[in-house]
Amino acid sequence: MFCPECGSTDKKMVGDICIDCFLKEFQMIELPKRIEVEICSHCNSKFEEGKWSEENIPEEEIIYRALERNIKIADEVENEIINLEIDQIKGTISTCFVEVVGEVHGTQIDETHECEVKIKKTVCPSCSKMQSGYYETVIQFRADNRELKAEEYAKADEIVERTLIKQSKKDKLAYCPQIAKLKEGYDYYIGSFKSGRKVAESLKEEFGGTIKESPRLISEDKSTGKGLYRIWISVRIPEFEVGDFIKYNDKIVQVNNIGKNSVLGFEISTNKKQNIPMKNIDEIKLIKKSDECETTTIISKSPSVIQILDPVDYSTQDLEMREDFESYNIGDEIKFIRIDNYIYLVN
């Protein structure tokens, strides 16, 4: 066979022409002369294939990835090695070179292509929302029948911040653009539904209490006709605190711990442990606050009885000795709580 283009009869044929004539017109890769990449000027996320993805990528890495994504390698190329180089950057335009070495039908060849990559800076929807103070959830942090304490507010602020920092690794709207400090409690405005619910769960895990969600229709998406909602999440922590005295199932319990799912304490007449499910919080009644405890003096003790002096009328009161009071001695001060005209010793 001979090559119709050069007349050669002693060269390897590729289709109807010889290898040399084939390689004259052959290109190992196709690459546009100019590539445009749209990135967010705030978080460096990039817009491709109709969506925003991958934030905080260095600009040079964005350029390299744009080149890689736009290189098309011909099917005939084998064992290719591709080198990318940014020659110079002027403003938003980078001049780049792509060098390719590979084998085509047993012949090793190399090519160099020049390409410009233009960075178009804009603002992604998430950053636009963040800048405008956009929010989807309001966390209403409250306490039942009492005012929240300064230390509870401080702890809540810490929990909200910590939870949002953790959530921000996977949710760009994990931020708090506003905290409304009201007389009845704090309202935390949270960027997204998902992170708002995480914040509410974290607050409940620390303080106990109940969570209730109330979605509200705020507008309608004109493009889809669907309603746009915000969610108000009420986190109400218990009226009682650690150390307080509560009544549950006709038992008087001193609260030892308030958790996400239960209230732990000791029945004050028997010192037996009590575990009350948080779902039954409506059945718990606050009897006395911890600061209502009184102090008195032990005036006598025996293996079965401990005798104290009532500081109100200075009468003596004989109370059943409990194992946890055996280490006390005559003359020691001891705390007690007065409930329904009955005195209970407490630790």
Image (spheres, rainbow, N blue to C red):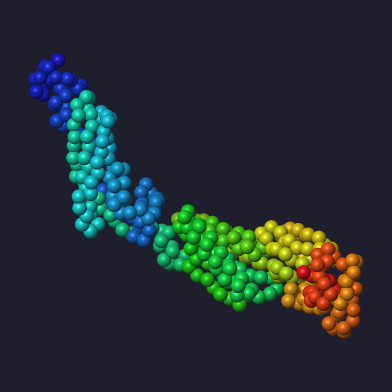
Residue located at (29% from left, 43% from top): 68
Please identify the residue farthest to the top as the structure is shown. 1
Residue located at (54% from left, 73% from top): 180
User: Number of labelled discs?
Assistant: 0
Please identify the residue farthest to the left as the structure is shown. 7
> Left or right: where does residue 135 sit relative to residue 58?
right
Does any portion of residue 215 appear in the rendered image? no
Q: Position of residue 24 (x, y in %)?
A: 14, 30
Please identify the residue farthest to the bottom as the structure is shown. 313
Q: Which of these two is toward me, 224 or 198?
A: 198
Residue located at (53% from left, 67% from top): 189
Q: Position of residue 294 (x, y in %)?
A: 78, 78
> Left or right: where does residue 198 sit relative to residue 119?
right
Residue located at (27% from left, 40% from top): 71
Tell me the quarter of the picture where residue 200 sits. bottom right
> Which quadrant of the rendered structure holds the N terminus?
top left
Q: Position of residue 10 (x, y in %)?
A: 12, 17
- Answer above or below: position of 40 versus 245: above
> Left or right: where does residue 186 sit relative to residue 36?
right
Tell me the quarter of the picture where residue 296 sits. bottom right
> Which quadrant of the rendered structure holds the C terminus?
bottom right
Does any portion of residue 306 appear in the rendered image? yes
Q: Which of these two is toward me, 109 or 333?
A: 333
